[in-house]
Amino acid sequence: NQTGTQTSTLLGFASVAAQTSDSFDQVVVPAGYRAEPFFSWGDPVLPNAPIWRGDASEDWQAQLLQAGDNHDGMHFFPFASDPDNHGLLVINHEYINPTLHPDGATEYPHADGSRQRTLQEVLKEQAAHGISIIELKRNDSGRWQRVLGDYNRRISSLTPMRLSGPLAGDPRMCTASDPGGRDVIGTLNNCAMGVTPWGTYLACEENFHNYFVNRDPNDHAIRPEHQRYGIGNGASSRYYAWESVDPRFDATPQPEQPHQGHVNEPNRFGWVVEIDPFDPQSTPRKLTAMGRLGRECSVCSLADDGSMAFYSGDDARGEYVWKFIPDGRHDPDNPRASRALLDKGTLYAARFDADGRGHWLALIHGQGPLTAANGFPDQQAVLLNARGAADLLGATPMDRPEWVAVSPLNRDVYVSLTNNHQRGSTFALDAANPRPNNQHGQILRWSEDGGLPTALSFDWELFLLAGDAPGALDADGYPVAEELIGTIRGDSFSSPDGLAFDADGRLWIQTDADESAPHTHNMGCNQLLCADPNSREVRRFLVGPWGAEITGITWSPDYRTLWINVQHPGISYPASDGHSRPRSTTVMITREDGGIIGA
Ligand code: FEO
Ligand code: CA
Ligand code: CA
Ligand code: CA
């Protein structure tokens, strides 16, 4: 289903065909390339980890030593001594699949609608969240091998972390189990990520709201840090019902307990979590200066003078695009001094105007509407309810902002807006979100004034609207609806999510579409595509198994090895035998001639 002429000299591979069969259970890459399963849920991470049994019968202690589930954002950190052949791969484990239960059950209904879980199951699910850090070495024959050494680490929803920045120790962070408001247990729903110029990893906490419940409807209604962030107020949390055995996840106020119990626990999630992969003893830090969002990613753009911005998507319908500008600058000669940079700075939300200009709106207490009278008594309240503050500032509600990528050639910034079927109904159409019932999403790009990450205005445009090619037919042979037609020059796809640039300036696009829906009839399984930012040609590089999202992308420093993640495959990948339990998997891609991926 290719359209247009292939003229790009940046894209040097032959397009892979879409796979539309619901029995497709493989990863396909272009001729001349090899894709191999490399690191799957349950694989050993720590040296004393048991080998994966294959039936998910491991207990939580074993899971804590093995790879977590639902691999998502990741990054390869090279060792300075041998960067092309030795590094640490850091991988997010976003959430868990119901297949984790040996009996396949996902619901535990009681007469009152609540669900009772067992402690052992909940501990295992908490252990399967978080991050894996694994050491890799390329051997003399050029093959990457895992090293089960001292750098290997599992971070999970059970790992002690420290709050830093303006909300550390704040009364709004105090709970019955942490009266000091500084020590959080665990991280949740680490979706995409970022990397700092000083060599740390930024794991981002996305859909944390699904793990908590506040059963008091009156309290819920007046507590914006619950209500504006989607914390449920039913009988039980939206997913997993951890609160049935772990009171930390029950955010219903308990007046008889210190700090009303755990009502503030959800305030301790939704942050960027900074991790030093080269120090296995280090305590991860939750960076409150950067604001609390349903945070997809945190991607750095560094200027020549060491000033910088960190861009984020907040992935929910009608949420915003963000950037954080640290007060200080990075000094490459003194990288350790940069470690406090993310504790002080200014948070901005984006407004995209119809004339192609855009503006960054500062979230500063006392400026404009951000006053006590409007529910923002101090800067801490602004950071805790950044969504509500941006509402008052008039930021532009977007079609689910996911990953951000910054061009290494000109610092242009790209964001994927994955889809939003409520556009044109709940959310008004606008220039940046122009399609009603937006099933396929779009990629938008902007250029900061002067090419500076710290600029407060920019020029923006739609890079492409995803969707079918003009003239495409649906499953019944009828022309697809006008609102499903995109502007892609090349291979069609739906629902862009992962975005990243390689060093040559190729833009890699990953998709997270529902391949069983009628609107993806022509695109099929999720995929990795590559775009030329100049010609806008898009070519399909990889197709994954049915049921899976394709996400997470990183390279070896020589760009001759690419790793991507197959998240929640639906059939039996990576065994691909039709009956084995499917496992989220990091896939390693190389060229048979050893060349640069995509060139
Ligand atoms: Fe976890 Fe917005 O994807
Ligand atoms: Ca995502
Ligand atoms: Ca997504
Ligand atoms: Ca996902």
Image (tube, helix red, strand yellow):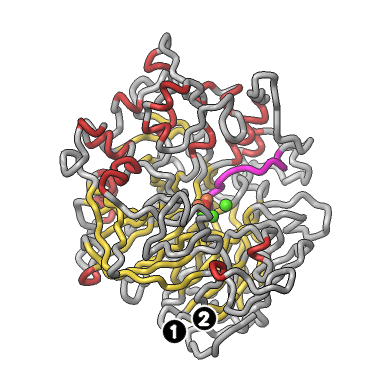
Quadrant in which residue 335 is drawn: bottom left
The kind of residue on which mark 1 rests is Ser
Disc 1 is placed on an element classified as: loop
525, above or below 369, in the image: below
Look at the image and say whether residue 573 sits in the magenta stretch.
no
Q: Residue at x 46, y 70 (%)?
A: 557
Q: Quick one: 28 or 562, which is closer to the camera?
A: 28
> Which structural element holds mark 2?
strand
Which residue carries the number 1 mark? Answer: 535
Residue 274 drawn at (x, y percent): 39, 46
Q: Work out whether mark 1 precedes mark 2 in sequence or the reverse, and give the earlier one.
A: 2
Q: CA distance from mark 1 to mark 2?
A: 9 Å
- Residue bounds of the magenta highlight: 90-100
Q: Are marks 1 and 2 in contact (CB under 8 Å)?
A: yes
Residue at position x 71%, y 35% from top?
A: 106
Q: Which residue does the numbered mark 2 point to in the structure image?
A: 489
